[in-house]
Amino acid sequence: MAELVHVRAELAQLQSTERTLVEQLLAVRVAIETQKSKISKLVKDRPSPINRLPIELLTRILHFVFVSNDGVPYGFSRSLPTLRKDLAGVSRFWRDLIRDTPIFWNNIGLTRDFDSKSLATQLKRSRGYLLDIVILNPHEGSLDALLDTLIPTTNRWRSLTVLAPGTFLSKIIRKLNQYKFPCLEDICIDLCKRSFPQFLLPTNCPVLRRLDIMGLRMTQDFFSKASSTLTTLSLSIRFINDLTFLSRTPTQSLTSLTITGSNPDGNRNRVLGQDTFCFPVLQKLVLDTRSPHLFMDAIVAPKLEHFGYGYDSGSIFGTFGSKFSHVSHFIYLPKFYDGTFCSWVARGLCQDFSGVRHASLPSIDVAAFFECTHPRGHLGSQTPADNWQSLESLSIICTEEYDSWDVDALVKWLTKRQGLGLPSLHIQLGGSPLVNMTIEEFSLRYSQLRDCCALSFKGIEVSHTLHPSTDGSLLRSCNGGLEQPHFAELAGNIS
C-alpha cells in the first residue's frame, strides 16, 4: 500500500512539471511572436540600404564624385549641376545632405547655361569654403551679372581656370585686374596672345603656387612680374624669339617647369651662357620647343628627376656632359615623326641621361635606342640603351606608325640582357587614341616579347572577330585566314 502511494505521488509531480513546461512553452511562443513583430517593425522603419552609409563616409564618396573631373574643366563644370540634381534625387536624405554640405557647392562653373540667380544660391550654400572657379563661355548677356555676383567672393578663390573666347576674355581680365586674391593658389588661363595680366602680379596673388598660361604674348619683363612663390609653371608661347627671358624665371622656388612653343630660327636667339642659372629644387622639366638644347645648356638642376621632350627628333642635339645623369624618368614623345631619328642621336641622349630608370618612347623610334651599332662582342656598349645601366622599366607608346615598328632590335637586346643574368625588364605597351590593333598584330607583339621581359599592356584597343570552332570548345580570332587560338591568354594580360 505504501508503495502505491509513493508511485501516485511521483505521477502527480510529473503532471505538475508537465503543466509548468506547457505554460513555459506557450509563454515562449508568445515571446517569439512578439519579437518577430518587433523585428518586422524595425526592418520596416529602418533606413533604406542607400541611406545606411555613415554620413562621414557618404560625404567623402560624394565629394570624390564631384571633384573627379580628370583635368577637363569644360565637361566637368557643364555636367556638375546635372550631377548634383541626379544625386539629390536618390533620396530625401541624400538631397538634404547635398544641399546642406558646403564642399559640394564650392566648384563654380560659369557656362552658357548658368545664370546669376543660380550662382548666388551656390555661393550661399558654399558658405565660407574656398572656391574653385571655372570661367568658360557664359552667355554674353549674363556675363556682367555673373561677374558682379562672383567678384565679392575673391577673398575665397582657391583656383581659377579661364578658357573663355577672346570676345569675353578682355572684359573678364579688365574686371579681375581691379581686385586682389589673397587665397588664390592655382591659375590656368588662355590669354589668346595677350600680355601678362595685372591681376596675376604678386601683390594681387601673394600665395600663387601653380600657374599655367597659354597663348602668352611674351614681353621682356614678364618674369619680373611673376610671383616668387611659384612652384609649378607651365608656359605655352607661340613664338619664342629671345630665350634670355628664361633667366628671369623664379628659379629658387620652381619644382616643375613646362615650356611649349616654337622659335622660327634658333640661330637668331641670343645664346645663354652654359650653366648660367640654377634651379635648385626643380624636379620636373618638360620642353616642347624646337631648340631645347639652348635652354638645357644654360641651366643647372641638381634635383631634376623627370625630363620630358615632345617636339621633333632632330632638335634636341646638345652636349650636356654629366649634369643630367641623375635624371631617373625620361619621356620622349615627339609631335612629329619624320623618320630622321637615328642611333647616334639616341646614343647621345642615353649618354647624357645615363641614370634613367624609367623611360617612355614612341614605338617608331624604339629601334634607334636598342639596335646594335657594333655587332661583335658582348652587350657592353653596343647599343645606345646600354648607357642606361639602371633601367628598370620601358613604356612603349604605339603611335599611328606602330605597324612599321621594328621590334627585333629590342628583342635581341632583351635576350642578351637575360643571358648576362640581369634583372628582367618591365615593358608596358601603351596605346594612343588613334591606334587600333588587329588581334593578329597584338598577338605578334605579345609572342615576340613575352619570353624576354615582364610584359604588360595599357590602353590598347584590339579589333577582332570571334568565331566558334567546329567542335564548339574554343574561340578563335579569324582574319585573313589566320587563326590565333590563344586570345584568352593574351586578354588576361591587358590591364
Image (spheres, helix red, strand yellow):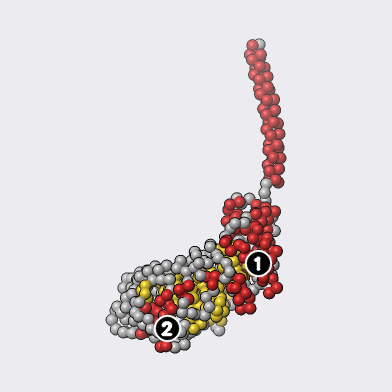
Residue 254 visible from this viewpoint: yes
Q: Position of residue 494 (x, y in %)?
A: 51, 70
Residue at position x 67%, y 46% from top? 46
Q: Which residue is nearer to you in this view: 261 or 454?
A: 261
- SS type, badge 1: helix
Q: Which residue is nearer to you in this view: 43 or 71?
A: 71
Q: Position of residue 79 (x, y in %)?
A: 65, 67
Q: Label 2 is placed on what type of residue?
A: Ser
Question: Quadrant location of the N terminus?
Answer: top right
Residue topped by disc 1: 148
Q: Is residue 329 left or right of residue 24?
A: left
Residue topped by disc 2: 291
Q: Is residue 346 above or below residue 71?
A: below
Residue at position x 41%, y 71% from top? 251
Q: Label 1 is placed on what type of residue?
A: Asp
Q: Position of residue 200 (x, y in %)?
A: 52, 70
Residue at position x 42%, y 77% from top? 246
Q: Which residue is nearer to you in this view: 328 or 367?
A: 328
Q: Crowding at label 2, few (<14), some or many (≥20) Cα neighbours within 10 Å?
A: many
Task: Examine the image and state in which quarter residue 285 appears.
Answer: bottom left
- SS type, badge 2: loop
- Give the numbered dot on residue 341: none
Q: How many marks?
A: 2
Task: Examine the image and state in which quarter residue 105 appears.
Answer: bottom right
